[in-house]
Image (cartoon, rainbow, N blue to C red):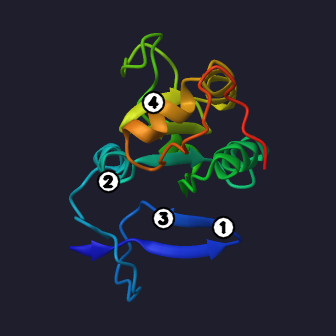
Amino acid sequence: MQRLRRRCSNDVVRLDLATPPNSSSSSSLSIDGAESTETRIQRLISEHPVIIFSRSSCCMCHVMKKLLATIGVHPTVIELDDHEISALPPASEDGSSSSSSSSLAPAVFIGGACVGGLESLVALHLSGHLVPKLVEVGVLALSPGYDNNNPIISS
């Protein structure tokens, strides 16, 4: 098994999904050289309860991270190259994967399910369903005074 190269920039971790030739990185994430990009992405989705796949310097990703941080969740953020973005599993209307729809970047996955892009994440939050979903996957605990009918949480 070889290791993923890991570079940190601000609060974003850049994971190069391409197999490094002879990397001596100390990353705790390991990959199998025979593992495809699609398989790596699927594995990362299953290993992280909240994960955002994005392009480098994506302002929409920044807004997604800020929204989640306001709630108290700090997602894993993976920056993908253009050829890797096409390997993202697309979201369908019911939230399940479908090969007929196009991939979005940035795309957020919660509990292994694709929520979609920024617009879908904000809609989920405004409808009052984001916090319960985050509680369901175990990344957030509800405070005693939380009101599901008023989902906007102020700091």
Which residue is labeled 4 in the image?
Answer: 114
Task: Looking at the picture, tell me which residue is in the foreground, 107 or 5.
Answer: 107
Which residue is labeled 3 in the image?
Answer: 16
Task: Looking at the picture, tell me which residue is in the foreground, 113 or 71.
Answer: 71
Residue 76, x across and y down, in percent = 51, 57
Q: Which residue is located at x 38 percent, y 89 percent?
A: 24
Residue 60, x across and y down, in percent = 74, 40
Looking at numbered disc 4 in the image, what kind of residue is underneath it?
A: Cys
Give me the C-alpha separation between circle 2 and circle 1.
Answer: 19 Å
Residue 105, x across and y down, in percent = 61, 36
Give me the C-alpha separation between circle 4 and circle 2.
Answer: 14 Å
Tell which tag, 1 or 3, sits nearer the viewer. 1
Q: Earlier in the sequence, mark 3 or mark 2?
A: 3
Left-right relation of 48 to 122: left
Q: Are marks 2 and 1 in contact (CB under 8 Å)?
A: no
Q: Earlier in the sequence, mark 4 or mark 3?
A: 3
> Where the N terminus falls, by quadrant?
bottom left
Looking at numbered disc 1 in the image, what kind of residue is underneath it?
A: Asp
Tell which tag, 3 or 2, sits nearer the viewer. 2
Q: Secondary structure at mark 2?
A: helix
Q: Secondary structure at mark 4?
A: strand
Looking at numbered disc 3 in the image, what kind of residue is underneath it?
A: Asp
Residue 99: quadrant of the picture: top left
Looking at numbered disc 2 in the image, what kind of residue is underneath it?
A: Glu
Which residue is labeled 1 in the image?
Answer: 11
Q: Earlier in the sequence, mark 1 or mark 3?
A: 1
Task: Please say if 1 is above or below 141.
Answer: below
Q: Are marks 4 and 2 in contact (CB under 8 Å)?
A: no
Task: Looking at the picture, tell me which residue is in the foreground, 142 or 58.
Answer: 142
Q: Residues within 10 Å of mark 2 (few under 14, many from 20)?
A: few
